[in-house]
Amino acid sequence: FHAAGYDNDGDMVDDFTQAPLVDLNDSGGTDVADPARVTKVMVPTGLIRKEYWLPNLVLDADVLISVPVLKNHYLAGVTLGMKNLIGLLPNDIYHGPGNIYGKHSLSHGPIELDQHIVDLSLARRPDFIVVDGQRGMIDGPIGSQVITPSMGLILAGRDVVAVDTVGTLAMGYDPRSIPYIQLAAQSGLGTTDTSNIRVVGMPLVRARRDFPAPYSTSP
């Protein structure tokens, strides 16, 4: 939080909004599932797992708003409202062997990662999505290159699948090429049918840009 400019004095309170800051990666310690912090959520229709540990703060919240940065992604194709939910999983529990960072105990294969993304929306579907498309990263997930000129967009809506469909189109990609968007629609999480998606504000045809497909080795 300090490095990102939210908390310069280290008090775990956002310097500008005074909102409390919470590290969702903390489940009570490495390989610990403290019931005061996390709860195991059952996902009967999960595509790859039937249960996930999620932070109590998220489960108890009246409203969950997903606020991703608009970018492409080496493994998932794009990062938007649904992919952003991977951040809900505590690193303390889902870290890989010998590395407490990341969620690498979850398979990141080209099919399995898409299934995890859908499962998390089934476990705790976001109530609203606000996509920060002010810039638009073209070498995600952790690159530094933005499209020129910047996108200058904010996308928002209640249907996470519809928002991700429109966000994908805004990057010049075909939503049918993003498996997790299709799987989410098949799982009843929302619609990909553009004839049933009403876009207000700037028309999509004006907002759309052609992002590169920079990863020749991407699965």
Image (spheres, helix red, strand yellow):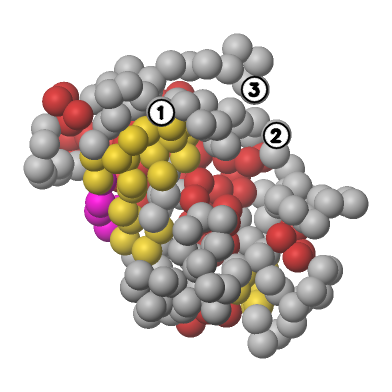
Image x and y of residue 124, in percent: 49, 65
Residue marked by disc 1:
146
Q: Residue 156 colored magenta?
A: yes
What residue range appears in magenta? 155-159
Dot 2: within a 10 Å radius of its alpha carbon, few (fewer than 14), some, or many (20 or more) residues? few
Q: Amino acid at mark 1?
A: Val
As helix, strand or loop, the secondary structure at mark 1 comes to loop
Give whichever of discs 3 and 1 has the lower sequence position: 1
Residue 76 sits in quarter: top right
Up/down of 40 relative to 3, above or below = below
Between label 1 and label 2, give the one nearer the viewer: 1
Up/down of 177 relative to 187, above or below = above
Instruction: Write the residue at 10% across / 44% down.
Output: 200
Instruction: Write the residue at 42% across / 49% down.
Output: 68
Q: Nearer the viewer, residue 116 or 35?
A: 35
Q: Residue 8 colored magenta?
A: no
Residue marked by disc 3:
219
Up/down of 184 relative to 25, above or below = above
Gap between marks 3 and 1, in whole Å?
Answer: 22 Å
- Residue lying furthest top in this view? 216
Gap between marks 3 and 2, in whole Å?
Answer: 8 Å
Q: Nearer the viewer, residue 18 or 193?
A: 18
Q: Amino acid at mark 3?
A: Pro
Image x and y of residue 206, in percent: 14, 25
Instruction: Write the residue at 79% across / 74% down.
Output: 29
Q: Amino acid at mark 2?
A: Gly
Give whichever of discs 1 and 2 has the lower sequence position: 2
Label tally: 3
As helix, strand or loop, the secondary structure at mark 2 comes to loop
- Residue lying furthest front in this view? 9
Dot 3: within a 10 Å radius of its alpha carbon, few (fewer than 14), some, or many (20 or more) residues? few
Residue marked by disc 2:
109
